[in-house]
Amino acid sequence: MAGTIGSVASCFSNTRPGSAVVRCGCPSRPSVSNRYSGTQPQWSTEAGQLRAVRATRDLGCDTHWFDAAWFEGGFPNGVGNWFCKPKSFPNGLQPVSDACHGLGLKFLVWFEPERVAPGTQIAREHPEFVFGGAKAACSN
């Protein structure tokens, strides 16, 4: 992502229903930029997300939604590892959060507590939280 409005117009293509409705150029609800990319590894890095935050602001959104793939193992196999990928986010998500707040944006991080993949941290450390135990892990 180059950080220009033209290069990130697709940010609106993956918004949750009702989260970004634009009429006559004016948001009718809080607008959320959410663009998940499982095919572009640079997207799910600190540098990639800092570019995405600036693009969110440039689009006129009020919230930057960091979707799946921020956690170790990626999506969907890492669902249940609710910690950042250390190589991609050596400083955790704090720099992304700080960038959002510094630009007047809200920061939303996606996770799915009801979905746990086998072998993930939650499945291993808290099998009592998972229907069927650590090896059965839930998926929706």
Image (cartoon, rainbow, N blue to C red):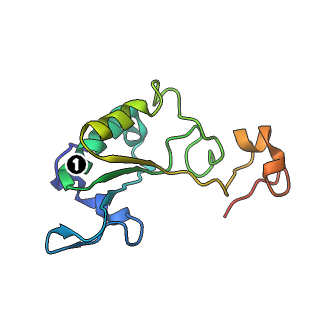
- At 79% from the left and 42% from the top, the residue drawn is 126
Q: Position of residue 87 (x, y in %)?
A: 49, 26
Residue 32 to residue 72: above or below: below
- At 82% from the left and 54% from the top, the residue drawn is 136
Q: Position of residue 32 (x, y in %)?
A: 33, 58
Q: Amino acid at mark 1?
A: Arg
Residue 52 in view (yes/no): yes
Q: Position of residue 51 (x, y in %)?
A: 27, 39
Which quadrant of the view contains residue 23? bottom left
Q: Nearer the viewer, residue 106 or 40?
A: 106
- At 49% from the left and 41% from the top, the residue drawn is 70
Going by the image, does 128 lie left or right of 84?
A: right
**Which quadrant: the N terminus?**
top left
Total numbered circles: 1
Residue 134 in view (yes/no): no
Residue 134 to residue 33: above or below: above
Which quadrant of the view contains residue 45? top left
- At 70% from the left and 50% from the top, the residue drawn is 117
